[in-house]
Image (cartoon, helix red, strand yellow):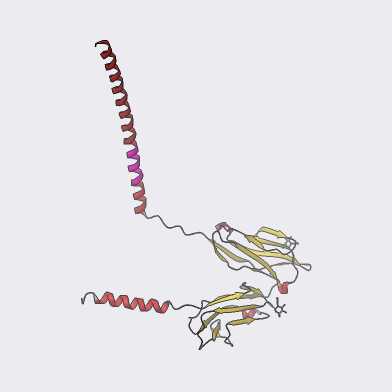
Amino acid sequence: MCRLLPPVALLLLTSADTRAADLPKAVVSLDPKWDRLLEKDNVTLQCRGAYPKEDNSTRWLHNGKPLPGQSSTYVIADARVKDSGNYSCQTASFTLSDPVQLKVHADWLVLQAARWVLQEGEPLQLRCHSWKNIRVGKVQYFRNGRGQQFSHKNSEFHIQYTKRAHSGSYFCRGIIGKQNVSSEAVNVTVQGVAVPAVSPFLLLWQMAFCLVMGLLFAVDTRLYFSVQKELRSSLRKKRNDKVTCGKNP
Ligand SMILES: *[C@@H]1O[C@H](CO)[C@@H](O)[C@H](O)[C@H]1NC(C)=O
Ligand SMILES: *[C@@H]1O[C@H](CO)[C@@H](O)[C@H](O)[C@H]1NC(C)=O
């Protein structure tokens, strides 16, 4: 009994541990969903988490420093470069969210995507967003310096089913007024679907299986031919017997 106690105690301890870690995390989402912005853009950060009746306040952090206000949304209007950084939130019954990184650029163009890291097969959608949504023409998207798509108007760049080869450094370029302007380049990563490694034991087992099957097949084939041969010779013998029987009643 005494010997059983320590593992039981350990079990209780670990279950208490996991319970603490299982507390739900709040989640920050962006509306619109772009995490790369230009100055003067607007974005609303939303904190998702449960709000108990007695406390519906939200705590917001920007680069670890508390922000004023307790609303479940945090509005950034007329964004400035200094609004860049990590945002996280927390509610009364949810733990601190993972940070969401915002980047505000002082530029003419910025490349935008909902996500920069994808799994193979997921769609990629890129936007070439201009300062104050000013008109931009002759828009071209590039991957690793090679042109991918050209449009006279500013169309988005879509890949329906991405492959790993679509990973790379992307930027867009266009004409604003008479100026030829480019966005900063951003890395897009398309990850392969994880293939479970084949264990050497399984490989050996498969090899043994194939070997046995091959042997069985060889034995079977030999058996088949020898039985056939025997059958044929016995048939011939029978026929011969019949013939001799007919001749000598
Ligand atoms: C941000 O919001 C203000 C006020 O609604 C609006 O005037 C402005 O055009 C918006 N900025 C952009 C880039 O859309
Ligand atoms: C913009 O500039 C690049 C070189 O910097 C040039 O290759 C390209 O043709 C220009 N685009 C237009 C539409 O003039």
Query: In what quadrant of the picture does the N terminus appear?
Result: bottom left
Q: Whereabouts is ligand 1, in terms of quadrant? A: bottom right
Residue at (26, 76) in percent of width and height = 6
Q: Which quadrant holds residue 124?
A: bottom right
Judged left or right of residue 195, residue 43 is right
Horizontal arrangement in the rendering, residue 159 relative to residue 196 (left or right): right
Given residues 239 and 105, the one toward you in this image is 239
Q: Residue furthest right?
A: 178
Give the image location of residue 33, x and y in percent: 61, 72
Q: Residue 178 or 218: which is nearer the viewer?
A: 218
Residue placed at 36% from the left, 48% from the top? Answer: 206
Q: Is residue 226 left or right of residue 92?
A: left
Query: Magenta residues, as a range?
Result: 209-217
Q: Could you tell me which quadrant the C terminus lies in?
A: top left
Tell me: residue 193, above or below residue 130.
above
In the displayed structure, 156 sits above or below 84; it is: above
Quarter holding residue 137: bottom right
Residue 165 image point, x, y percent: 57, 57
Magenta stretch, overall SS: helix
Which of the 4 quarters of the picture holds residue 134? bottom right
185 in the magenta segment: no
